[in-house]
Each structure stands twice: as C-alpha cells, then as structure tokens.
Amino acid sequence: MIIKKFQANTETEAIMLAKEELGKDAIVMNIKTISPKGFYRLIKKPVVEITAAIDENVSYKSEKPKFNMPIRKSYVPDIIYQKDSEENNSDLKSFQEKSEPSAIEQKLNNLQSLLEKQMTARTVQDIPEIKPNEQNKSLACIQLIYNQLVSNEVDEKYANQIISEIENTLKKDASMDNILASIYQKIILKLGQTNAINITGKRPKFVFFIGPTGVGKTTTIAKIASSFKVNEKAKVAFLTADTYRIAAVEQLRTYANILGIPLKVIYSEEEMRQAKEEYADFDLVFVDTAGRSHRNKEQRDDIEQLLKTIPEEEREIYLVLSATTKYRDLIKITEAYSEITNYSLIFTKLDETGCIGNLFNIRMYTNAPLSYATFGQNVPDDIGRIDAQNIAKQLLRGQ
C-alpha cells in the first residue's frame, strides 16, 4: 500500500496531483484545509491537503465521471456522498464532511475513546491478561476493532481478513492511531471506486435495473432519471418490461408524465430491438424489469435474454437490493444474478436499518462495484452515491 499527502491551492488541484503520481485508481482518504499561522495568515491563503492511497496488489475499474445528485437537507445516511449546490460538477471529490475537517483519529474519536476505556478496564474477552507493554496494548486494540466490525454485522470472515492483512504491516508497538488508520485505509481500498451512471459520447446507453420484487426498482429509476433530466439536461427515455404488475407500469408512467419523458412498454425481445432503433438519438434509456424470484431459473432466463438484446458495450446493469434483506438471502440473490450478468450494486431502504455491514459483505462477496443508495420514497431527493470513506467510518464508529 502506498500512502502520500498532496497540497495545492484548491481541492481539485490537490487531487489531480495525487492522480498524476499514484494513478487514476488512487483513493482519497482525507481532505483538510490548512490555514497559515501567526503573521503568515495575513499574507498567505489556506491550502488544501489530501491524503491518498493506492494498493499495488489490487486492481480496480477506472473511475467514471460522477453527476450531481440533489440531496435534501434532512435525513441523509452517513454513508451517502453529498455535494452542496454551490459546488461545481467536478468528479474528483470523494466525500463531503458534515463537520469541521479533522484527522483520522478525530473522525473515529468515538471508537478511540471506547478502546481506551475498555483497555484501561481490561474488559477484552479474548485477551484476559493485559500486561503493561505496548505489544499487548496493540493486540487489545486490534481485538476491540474486530469486535466493533462484527457488531456492525461485518462477516467474521472479512473482519478476520482485514485484521490479518494489517497485522503483517504493523509494528509490534504500533499506536492506536496507526492501527485505526491502517484498518480504515484497508476498508476503503477493499470497497474500491464507486460506479455511477454517466453520459458518454456513444448514444444511446441502456441502463437496466434488475432485482427481486419489492426492493424499489421503479422509484430508484425515477430518482436517477430525474437528476439527469433536470440537472444534466439529458435526453432520457423509459422502457418497462415489468408487465406482471399493472401498478408498476402506471407508477413509471406517472413519473414519465411529470418529467416529460417518453415511456414504452416492452413485451418481447423483438420490441426491445425496435425500441433501440426508436430511441437511437437519446442519451440514456432506463429499463425497468420485472421483479423475479432468484430461485426461479425460468424467470432468470427471461431477464438474461432481454439483456442480450442490447450489446454489452451499450448497456449498464444495476442489481437493486434492499439493505433490510438478510445476509444469507442477499448471497443467494447475488449468486443467482451473477449467473446471467455482471452488475453494479444499488442498496435501497437505508432509512429502515441501523447496520450497513451487509453493504461491505456483499461488495466483498461479489466483487461488484457499489453505486447508489436510497433512503426514502421522495423523488428525486432520497438517493445519493455511496461513499467508501463514510462506510469505513460508520463500520468503525463506536456506539
């Protein structure tokens, strides 16, 4: 792992320096503003310092341009990446602080306080005898961080994997700050770059949304499409192959009427090919598919055939999952859809759960990139792009 700091007059310039030196797959771990002290504050401007990292042993997909998602100023989960309306559309910022800029140990202050209290009280279950030396303090700290990950529903297999990987790189007398920073960085690197829909020069791009019933595919489509229509002035169309539920077609039709977007109902693969020709001059065509049982092979085959009507280079596929679904069921669902296509991951209903360990688990299990998360029914507000840094902070945060 390579970790470096870069300073520049603006955040964008600092991140560009990091990208130039570390490569396009570098992960931004921290951004802070450094103000001159003393007399120099009168004549020098603040500079922006970023901390970036790259794991030489892991390869990630190249990052795609991001787009602005309007986020309302009420409930927004900690893992969601926001942008202020005053910001430009730069695709380089990886997160927005909700409080004042701070170092990693400050961001994880709650957990650090918890660790200090528990080590002082010698309450670590798996390390009954803690003698007063730095090595045992490090072991106690690692054990507590492991417990914290598991309590946030990270699978024990992945928690052990993270711990074993950082133990090989830590000194025996590593401080609590170094241990926290190493695990924090490791989680971010494992999560990788977030994938997002973008407009390319090649038109049109067909964006398919697949997944089980009741996870909110139709509403998610409306939220993303409205952002492109309103913010990006993109030429957008809707297709729906969800002819099993009349309500689903009418729901999408309502959104289409409000946004002034054409809607076409697809009943066969041939009609999909016709729609491809009909919408040849559109930027994005969002395709709503019927919710299917992951246990029904015939239904999965239907979706596979529908996807194959569009060449691979002209389509993107997003598997929509509910954050409230049990981990065991999520594994079965992702396995079933992995048999028919590659996909990026969208998680819905974050407002209905307090733990996000499954987001990390499924990312690790499938190796599919994370993309968006939704946290309510309001269109277009209750959606945002998942941010790896915020996931790491929430997984490590003390209760």
Image (cartoon, rainbow, N blue to C red):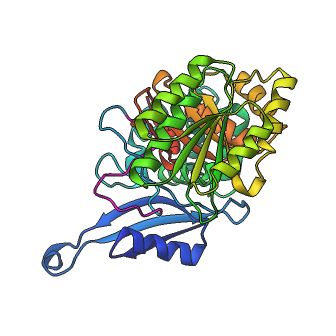
At 75% across and 33% down in the image, what residue appears? 334
From this view, report whether residue 396 is shown above or below residue 95: above
Q: Nearer the viewer, residue 206 or 16?
A: 206
Picture quarter with the C terminus: top left
At 17% across and 79% down in the image, what residue appears? 40
Residue 305, picture quadrant: top right
Q: Position of residue 351 (x, y in %)?
A: 45, 26
Residue 212, picture quadrant: top right
At 46% across and 49% down in the image, what residue appears? 228
Q: Position of residue 56 (x, y in %)?
A: 70, 66
From this view, report whether residue 248 is shown above or below residue 192: above
From this view, report whether residue 375 is shown above or below residue 27: above
* 84 inside magenta stretch: yes
Q: Nearer the viewer, residue 289 or 155?
A: 289
The magenta-colored residue range is 76-91
Q: Position of residue 160 (x, y in %)?
A: 70, 39
